[in-house]
Image (tube, rainbow, N blue to C red):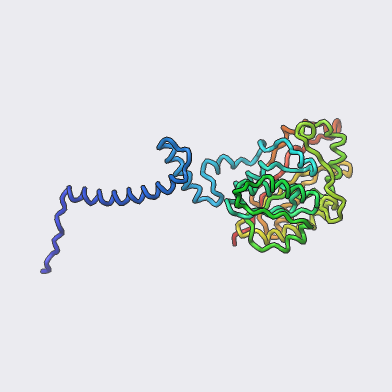
Amino acid sequence: MKNKIKQPIVGAEDVNGMLFKVEEKIAMKAKTTRKIIEEKVEDSIYPSDINLNIKEEEQRGRTFNGLTASEWAALSRNVWNDLSSPRETHHLEHGAVYPVKLVSRLVSLYSRKGDWIIDPFLGVGSTVVGAIDLDRNAVGIELNPRFVEIATRWVEDRRGLLSKAEAQILQGDCRKVLRTLPSAKFQLLITSPPYADFIHRSVEDRKHTHKKSIIRLENNSRVKAYSDSPDDFGNLPYSEFLRELENVLAECYRLIRPGGYQVWVVKDHRDTRAGIPYIAVHSDLVDVAKRVGLVIHDLIIWDQNEQRRLVLLGYPSVFYTNQNCSFLVVLRKPKY
């Protein structure tokens, strides 16, 4: 019969002692981790504040965009009506400028600090300004030399001395400039293309139908043709605009890294004079994007009703709604 190995008898005091040593090691490790996190926490007075900030810091480390769970939920509405802001003087040179607040929100949702952002139709610079404000790097491409000058000055004025974000503003036709940029460099594209030759109709519309709208009188909004260049997307017939837009989307597909996003800010139109009651620009954009391999990821409505008075359209024979919203078409490049 084999001798049984006797196990040492462990008393309660020994167990408690061993548990204490284990707990002490765990406590020391937790204390070290907590100290590292607490060094990043500012303005925390009460223990509950410290615990909350530690939890948030842990969440930021887990998410691809650095948002906490509460921030993630708060920003998940699909209708945004809190973005409009008074236009600054340099905005009036362009006329169709989206607010930096919109850029900031999109940048926060679809990228994190240090990522690269691109805008192939930069205008006067809102995308680049919004990106560097949140410590993202940015490249903007603009055809109009005057807009490039305004954007460059705005970015230089906005960037702080301690900012580490890089900003490049390139002048030229985006169809050509995009080819010179490296593949899979960018996490996010934010842009609003010229809506074909619709801008010319909008100019006439503002002169007559919307001449007393809030968006024009109180929000300092202006609409005018961007240039007379044949390379300007704002001078193309709609069918040609969509063909050329497909080339841009294909090139941008190459530039965005797998899993990255593109957000196109567009507005639908009408051409009742030509017998076309509705032109679904956002749907046509999605169709073109699918042809180059992009996936429709989300659709966000930018509600601008509070900035425009309602006008009587089609009365008394045909009822039309006022087109007081823009669509943020969110596209994604598949990861694999």
Q: Is residue 21 left or right of residue 281?
A: left
**Image location of residue 253, percent across then percent down:** 68, 59
Left or right relative to 197: residue 114: left
Name the one closer to the observer, 263 or 223. 223
Estimate the x, y position of residue 138 in percent, counting from the top left: 66, 53
Q: Residue furthest bottom?
A: 1
Q: Residue at x 68, y 43 (%)?
A: 100
* Coordinates of residue 101 in the picture (x, y in percent): 66, 41
Determine the residue positioned at 67% across, 60% down: 255
Look at the image and tell me in which quarter the N terminus lies. bottom left
- Which residue appears at 64% of the width and 44% of the height? 104
Q: In the rendered image, is residue 261 in sight?
A: no
Q: Quadrant of residue 217?
A: top right
State which quarter of the image contains the C terminus. Answer: bottom right
Viewed as shown, does residue 216 lie left or right of 18? right
Q: In the drawing, does residue 175 fall left or right of residue 54?
A: right
Is residue 16 something one can see in this rendering?
yes
Please count the marks in the image. 0
Residue nearer the viewer, 7 or 37: 37
At 60% from the left and 54% from the top, the residue drawn is 115
Residue farthest front in this picture? 161
Could you say where residue 9 lies in the image, as x and y percent from the top left?
14, 55
